[in-house]
Image (cartoon, helix red, strand yellow):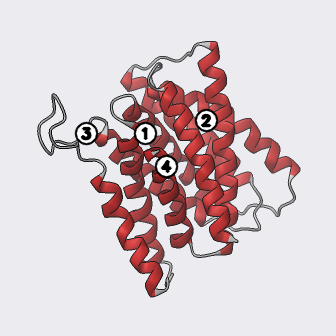
């Protein structure tokens, strides 16, 4: 059940990144990230208020806030990367850190012990995702073996997403969705702090804004499903399922 939830979560993440990636071709990527997170925050608030759940501890709120920092950095630099390079390249690259950091912490610090066959699958994911970051030999205007455009920003995004998934997985399953609400709010604040020095625009055309808001709501749904998935199985397994599916969606 946990694996299925992780895959559905990945589908939602994939839809969010696909839509916002297309928008980032027309509007500054960090601006898209800001409005997507603003769009997903009210939905998180509604879900937290309407769905049954326990009270969140101070530690749960802290993990939620830390997850928001990772989310803000992740989406801001992912959509910036999408405006600079191919979506089929930057999305899988952004998954490298998102997989490696939480899996490493889960095994070394949290005592998670995946089965041997699961380890084989986990070990294959990061190099497979990394290989797609290299330009196809002979591409016009590109040096053979050169790194694709947008990859540096995608690597920054990967660190942010790794922090997001790692922190959110530490939230107690009985704490309800209020830590996720805090995560959304903090992510907006982080994107604002990133947007200012980069001098990005604050507004979007109406049609693009509506699409970004809708994609942000789908992204919030993805986080809810991820929380449920990690509550049912090892964080490392759920995360790898999610990240691999997101990468495959991007390659489509």
Label 4 sits on a secondary structure element that is helix
Q: Secondary structure at mark 2?
A: helix
Q: Which residue is mark 3?
A: 148
Decide: is 110 above or below 34: below
Sequence order check: which comes first, mark 2 or mark 1?
2
Residue 194 x/y as whole percent: 43, 32
Q: Nearer the viewer, mark 2 or mark 1?
A: 1
User: Residue 90's x, y, as percent?
Assistant: 37, 42
Mark 1 highlights which residue? 78
Identify the residue position indicated by label 4 in the image: 70
Circle 1 — which element?
helix
- Crowding around mark 3 (Cα neighbors within 10 Å: few <14, some 14 to 19, many 20+) is some
The N terminus, quarter of image: bottom right
Cα–Cα span, label 2 and label 3? 27 Å
Q: Counting residues from the N terminus, which is met first, the one under dot 4 or under dot 3?
A: 4
Task: Kindly indicate whether the residue at mark 1 contacts the one at mark 4 (C-beta within 8 angstroms).
Answer: no
Q: Earlier in the sequence, mark 2 or mark 3?
A: 2
Residue 163 placed where, x, y %?
47, 56
- Label 1 vs label 3: CA separation? 14 Å
Q: Would you say 58 lies left or right of 105 here?
A: right
Cα distance between the residues tagged 4 and 1: 12 Å
- Tell me how far mark 4 sits from mark 2, CA to CA: 13 Å
| Displayed quadrant of residue 137 | top left
Between marks 2 and 1, how big is the CA–CA gap?
A: 13 Å
């Amino acid at each position: 059940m946990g694996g299925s939830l992780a895959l559905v979560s990945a589908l939602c993440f994939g839809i969010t990144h696909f839509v916002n990636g297309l928008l980032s071709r027309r509007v500054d990527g960090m601006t898209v990230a800001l409005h997507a997170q603003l769009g997903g925050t009210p939905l998180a608030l509604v879900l937290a208020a309407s769905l049954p759940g326990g009270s969140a501890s101070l530690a749960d709120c802290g993990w939620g806030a830390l997850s928001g920092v990772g989310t803000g950095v992740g989406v801001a630099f992912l959509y910036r990367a999408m405006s600079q390079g191919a979506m089929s390249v930057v999305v899988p690259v952004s998954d490298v850190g998102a997989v490696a950091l939480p899996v490493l912490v889960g095994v070394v610090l949290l005592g998670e012990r995946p089965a041997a066959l699961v380890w084989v699958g986990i070990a294959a994911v990061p190099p497979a995702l990394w290989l797609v970051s290299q330009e196809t030999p002979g591409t016009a205007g590109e040096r053979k073996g050169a790194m694709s455009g947008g990859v540096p920003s995608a690597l920054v995004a990967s660190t942010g997403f790794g922090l997001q998934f790692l922190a959110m997985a530490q939230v107690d399953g009985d704490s309800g969705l209020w830590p996720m609400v805090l995560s959304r709010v903090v992510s907006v604040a982080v994107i604002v702090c990133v947007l200012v020095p980069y001098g990005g625009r604050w507004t979007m055309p109406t049609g693009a804004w509506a699409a970004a808001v809708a994609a942000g709501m789908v992204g919030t749904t993805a986080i809810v499903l991820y929380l449920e998935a990690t509550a049912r199985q090892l964080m490392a397994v759920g995360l790898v399922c999610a990240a691999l599916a997101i990468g495959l969606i991007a390659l489509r």
